[in-house]
Amino acid sequence: MCYFGTDGIRGTYGQFPMTEEGAHRLGLAVAGYLKERGGRSLLLGRDTRFSGKNLAEALVRGLGKHLSVGDLGILPTPALAMAVASLRADLGVMITASHNPATDNGFKLLGPEAQKLPDAELAEIEKRLDERGTPSPEELLASKDADAPESNQKSPKAELADVERRLDESEAPFPEKPLVSEDAEASGPNLKNVSFADQYIAWLRGHWPGRLPLKRLLIDAAHGATSNFVPKVFASPEADILCIAREPDGHNINAGVGSEHVGFLAKQVLASGADLGIAFDGDGDRCVVCDADGEPVPGDQLLGIFALDLERRGKLAHHRCVATVMSNTGLDHSLRRRGIELLRSDVGDAQVWSRMLALGARFGGEASGHIIFRDLAPGGDGMLTAILLLSLLARTGRPLRELREEIPLFPQETCSLPVAANPPLATLAGFQEGCRQLEKNMGCVGRVFVRYSGTEPRIRLLVEAAENDAVEATMAALKKWVAKHLELV
């Protein structure tokens, strides 16, 4: 696919498809896709980027009048997923570029079960997007008459009411029935503002530990979608809750803060004397952690800590969990010693979820901090992960620095290099053979892994071995090997 990567469409704002024209065309494509399937309802959310509102408006114009669109405004991706599942909407669209800088934006598409759409369906939408061609200025300004509802169809208002009523007919997977603001002004003939924040906060608070196992907690909201949620979700009379990076201005999301800048989090933990530091990414589906010593806790160790806890409590289904091909081999060894089978998926939380379904696993995630508790939520949720970690610490009475010692990891180094183009690696003469030779040179526990990013024009490198010296030497050689075969920028 040309536009959809491992996490939807993503790119620099102002460059197609991340333009108003691209958003409009995507709206047209999505409308056609849903209409063919009899779908009528869509929920829309966004993070705090300056470009989000313009892209949302262009998308809605493309969707036309056939669809009932509920605008949830700024909220985390997991909250949109919850709303889609609870309201039983036919589709959810989150406008976000996750951990990328403010100059980027993107579109994540969630199906009626709050899962990211399968590749086959994304390919169909992408085909429709390409077939639309370039819209005229008139189409970009407004698609008013072309998509007027047919006389035998319900009005968008009636459709949204139908979506709400479906909650009363069966048990919702999340909290109580979400509210549709009665006093909210409609943003268009098919768009109504929907309030879901209180329900999402209440659901998260329902997992809050009986007592906090620490005196001071530091939380970095990345100036992103969790900014207005963190103070309410993590409020506690028992401890000092220090909330930082929660003053979004449209341009500061992820700017030196958040999940991609764990060094900043570590410094703030030490400076504030916090017992624990937690950082989220721009759209709130990831969680990274630092312990009281300011030491970052790798995502693989966090996965291992949760897996061991679930196993000890008899709640790890089939004694197995799922991680991606990027996860550290040390995680496999640590879990195997305790009778837990670690199974691998391709990169991306959607791939993790798909593998979990196929294997009957209820827990999994990525080293990046996407952690999935399938019994609780339909995907990664940073704030939920943080709360469950607090609960684990309270329940065990053990400090994080002690728990992480149960998951020793092999020395590993990762690197991300910008590329001018991404030809299939299998077509590069001798490239894969060279990578295999580098891996062989490190011995039986050495590993070299190379892949293109699914969200950026970059190639990602991973080297893992038993000794740090071998990792450093192999990574240096691997960078040269990649530069020899690809044009770096």
Image (cartoon, helix red, strand yellow):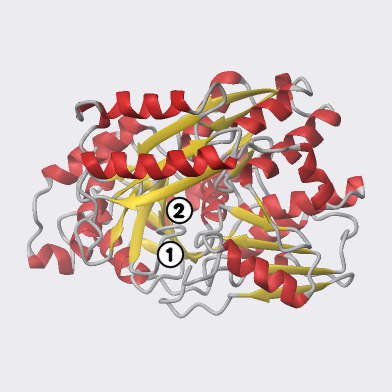
Q: Nearer the viewer, residue 426 or 204?
A: 426
Residue type highlighted by circle 2: Leu
> In the picture shown, does residue 424 fall above or below 161?
above
Q: Distance of mark 2 from mark 1, alpha carbons? A: 9 Å
Q: Of marks 2 and 1, which one's residue comes earlier in the chain? A: 2
How far from the left and from the top, in percent, is residue 458?
32, 49
Residue type highlighted by circle 1: Lys
What residue is shown at x 36% (from left), y 29% (from top)? Answer: 435
Q: Classify 10 Å Cα crowding around label 1: few (below 14), some (14-19), many (20 and above).
A: many
Residue 138 in the figure: left or right of residue 225: left
How far from the left and from the top, in percent, is residue 172?
64, 42
Q: Looking at the image, can residue 112 be seen? A: no
Q: Nearer the viewer, residue 346 or 144?
A: 346
> In the picture shown, does residue 164 fall above or below 236?
above
Residue 16 in the figure: left or right of residue 459: left
**Which picture quadrant has residue 20?**
bottom left
Q: Looking at the image, can residue 51 be seen? A: yes
Q: Nearer the viewer, residue 99 or 229?
A: 99
Q: Secondary structure at mark 2?
A: helix
Q: Classify 10 Å Cα crowding around label 2: few (below 14), some (14-19), many (20 and above).
A: many
Residue 332 in the figure: left or right of residue 117: right
**Which picture quadrant has residue 450?**
top left
As drawn, the label of residue 53 is none
What residue is shown at x 18% (from left), y 61% (from top)? Answer: 21
Query: Tags 2 and 1 in contact by the CB under 8 Å rule?
Result: yes
How far from the left and from the top, in percent, is residue 323?
57, 32
Per the image, the residue denoted by label 2 is: 160
Quadrant showing the N terminus: top left
Per the image, the residue denoted by label 1 is: 192
Q: Secondary structure at mark 1?
A: strand
What residue is shown at x 71% (from left), y 19% (from top)? Answer: 318
